Image (cartoon, rainbow, N blue to C red):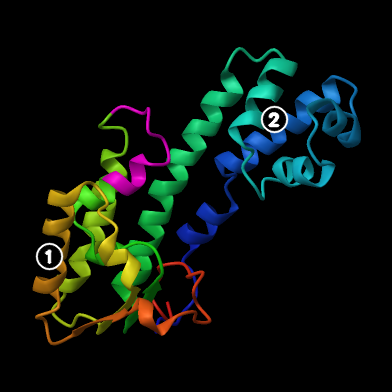
């Protein structure tokens, strides 16, 4: 469990505009410059006005289809589409950095996953395959930094006073061959090796248990951080 306030640097970072907010402000500016109300744009684009409002407020990233439609409507020549790609990539990397910071301070880490191996137990091939599914046509090295950040998070196990780690996974996480059968075999072998540590507890919820209240899963974050 981590206590204490944020440093000035952390507060300043929180106050900076994210790319998601920049995208929202840009769309809002383009809409107003074109003399369109929120409902006017929603009708033109054939999307709900509440959805576009969330995009303009920066609380939700637009879909590829919406961004392409807006890019064409405002004659941006692909600029909005490129911004969306950059925002998504940045979100993945920023999440990894924040998670690493919280894990480094945590007194214990407890995670539950219903469809994927927890991040701190993933091998590079597994992590890379997961990240690439979001953008299958991106260059092979596109997510190198994100994968490296995820691997760096695992240094928490090397701490002199490392936190107890408890992971519960649905059986499906072990049966789905992410990255191919060979990569999954290496992934499973890695889990078995990590599980040898007395500070690590790994449990699997079998299919035969049927439905359970957390079947939808929850974010893979350190408990109490």
- Number of numbered discs on residues: 2
The answer to whether residue 184 is above or below residue 205 is: above
Is residue 218 visible in the rendered image? The answer is yes
- The answer to whether residue 26 is above or below residue 194 is above
**Which mark, residue 12?**
none
Residue plotted at (12% across, 73% down): 192
Q: Which mark is residue 190?
A: 1
Q: Horizontal and vertical percent for residue 136?
A: 37, 33
Q: As rendered, which of 130 and 161 lies closer to the eye?
A: 130
Q: Quadrant of residue 105?
A: bottom left
Q: Which residue is found at the position 77% from the left and 28% from the top?
A: 29
Q: Is residue 118 visible?
A: no
- The crowding category of the residue bearing disc 1, from other C-alpha atoms within 10 Å (few below 14, some 14 to 19, many at least 20), is some
Where residue 137 sits: x, y (%)?
A: 37, 27
- Tell whether position 22 is magenta: no
Between discs 1 and 2, the one toward the N terminus:
2
Which residue occupies the extreme bottom position in the image? Answer: 198
Horizontal relation, residue 188 to residue 106: left or right: left
Helix, strand or loop under label 1: helix
Q: Residues within 10 Å of mark 2 (few under 14, many from 20)?
A: some
Residue 23, image x and y in percent? 64, 34
In front of the other: 43 or 114: 114
Tell me the chief SS of the magenta region: loop
Q: Image quarter for residue 109? A: bottom left
Residue 138 within the magenta-colored segment of the rendering: yes
**Which residue is tagged 2?**
26
Q: Residues in magenta?
A: 129-139
Q: Is residue 209 above or below residue 19?
A: below
Where residue 207 appears, as percent x and y from the top left, is: 37, 76
Residue plotted at (41% across, 80% down): 223
């Amino acid at each position: 469990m981590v206590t204490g306030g944020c440093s000035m640097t952390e507060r300043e970072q929180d106050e900076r505009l994210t790319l998601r907010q920049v995208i929202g402000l840009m769309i809002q500016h383009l809409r107003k410059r074109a003399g369109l109300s929120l409902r006017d744009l929603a009708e033109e684009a054939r999307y709900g006005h509440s959805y576009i409002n969330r995009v303009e407020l920066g609380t939700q990233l637009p879909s590829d289809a919406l961004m392409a439609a807006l890019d064409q409507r405002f004659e941006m020549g692909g600029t909005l589409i490129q911004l969306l790609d950059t925002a998504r990539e940045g979100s993945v990397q920023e999440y990894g950095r924040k998670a690493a910071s919280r894990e480094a301070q945590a007194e214990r880490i407890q995670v539950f996953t219903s469809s994927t191996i927890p991040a701190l137990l993933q091998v590079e091939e597994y992590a890379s395959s997961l990240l690439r599914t979001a953008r299958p046509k991106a260059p092979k090295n596109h997510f190198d930094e994100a994968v490296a950040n995820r691997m760096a998070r695992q240094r928490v196990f090397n701490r002199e006073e490392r936190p107890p780690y408890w992971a519960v996974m649905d059986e499906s996480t072990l049966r789905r061959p992410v990255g191919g059968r060979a990569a999954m075999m290496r992934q499973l072998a890695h889990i078995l090796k990590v599980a040898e540590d007395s500070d690590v507890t790994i449990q699997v919820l079998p299919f035969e248990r049927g439905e359970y209240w957390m079947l939808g899963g929850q974010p893979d974050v350190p408990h109490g951080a």
